[in-house]
Amino acid sequence: MSKPRVYLDHAATSPLRPEAKAAMEEGFGLWANPSSPHAEGRKAKQALEDARARVKAALGWDGEVIFTSGASESALLAFDHAAVINEAVSVVEHDAIYGFVDRRDIPSVPVGDEGELDLEVLAKLIEPSPIVEGKENRSLVAVQHVNSETGTIQNIETIAEVVRDHGGLLLADCAQSAGKMPLPDCDMAIVSAHKFGGPIGVGALLVRDFTMLKPSGGHERGYRRGTENLPDILGMAAALDAGDIENWATTVEQQFDFKNELFGHGEVLRMGMHCSHIIAVAHPTMSAQALLIRLDAMGFAVSAGSACSSGTLKKSRVLDAFGVPDDVAARTIRVSMGWSTTPEELEEFAGAWRSLS
């Protein structure tokens, strides 16, 4: 009998929580359109609004919740419909947001030696136009709360001060932090259910106030096109109800101890403040591609950077923006933990990592 595989790629997606699966199965029985006026529709609508209230409560969010198909749609909704005239993103954003730099010809904000956003550059980029009047004379600034490749935590509160001092709106990409850590102070937030044990294909754009967006469709109070995916929304709410990182199978302390163990036999990339559940670690000699093949054969699932781009052999744009030397980036893999990761799995991976050093 083969031994169970060890899954350490939760930053790509986490296994579905049993609570979420049960809620989805219940949702399949609520097949009516929540916008329909008949009894079946009203029953579905009641379940939808109950889930919305639970999501807000679990995340500690007192604004509005717009359900979407995931983080990418949430980002597109914010960029396409925010009541602003300018936009800016950090240079270390996930491709779902950084792609707007080329497509929309918007500026990117560099980071310093410790991975922190350059606030002086940011302030210059988001100055209101002297020739435009009205409340939309402001910028939307997108920053990833926890970086998906390195685990670096941006100081969102400090960034928010700069953005608001210039009349702007701050969009925090919380795909890697929501359901794990408290939400930061921001005007909008991106949430993705499958990152915390909910189903793939559902997420939300959190908005402090609907006046920050221009209406765009007939559903979700007029701010989204398309009927809500009620079974997945119920699964998302149930996954959040199951608890944050304090309720995982491993403690935060165990996760940091594991990071230190890997550091003893490689180079853990430590730019600025770090979360406990995402680790970028470079092997002393072996390439990332070789590591992935060896570790996969040994029964370990890890990745090299974001799952949305790790299928390519190109150097990570994010590691390059963080100033990681080419030779180190070429030997770097990402190890990420989630709700189902056990201390025994971390110990097993640490042993395998030592054997490859």
Image (tube, helix red, strand yellow):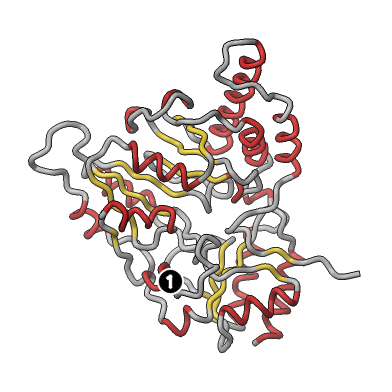
Asked whether, in this view, residue 26 is left or right of residue 327, the answer is: right
Tell me where residue 129 sits by quadrant. Answer: top left
The percent position of residue 153, horizontal first and vertical second, equals: 45, 59
Q: Residue, x 55% and y 19% (percent of image)?
A: 35
The percent position of residue 294, horizontal first and vertical second, equals: 68, 80
Asked whether, in this view, residue 233 is left or right of residue 76, the answer is: right
Local packing at callout 1 (Cα closer than 10 Å; few below 14, some 14-19, many 20+) is: many
Furthest-left residue in this view: 131
**Camera-side residue of 228 and 268:** 228
Asked whether, in this view, residue 209 is left or right of residue 88, the answer is: right
Q: Residue, x 65% and y 11% (percent of image)?
A: 39
**Kind of residue at badge 1:** Leu
**Camera-side residue of 186 and 12:** 12
- Residue 287 vertical position relative to residue 244 in the rendered view, above or below: below
Q: Which residue is mark 1?
A: 319
- Residue 119 vertical position relative to residue 229 in the rendered view, above or below: below
Tell me where residue 242 sits by quadrant. Answer: top right
Q: Residue, x 58% and y 21% (percent of image)?
A: 34
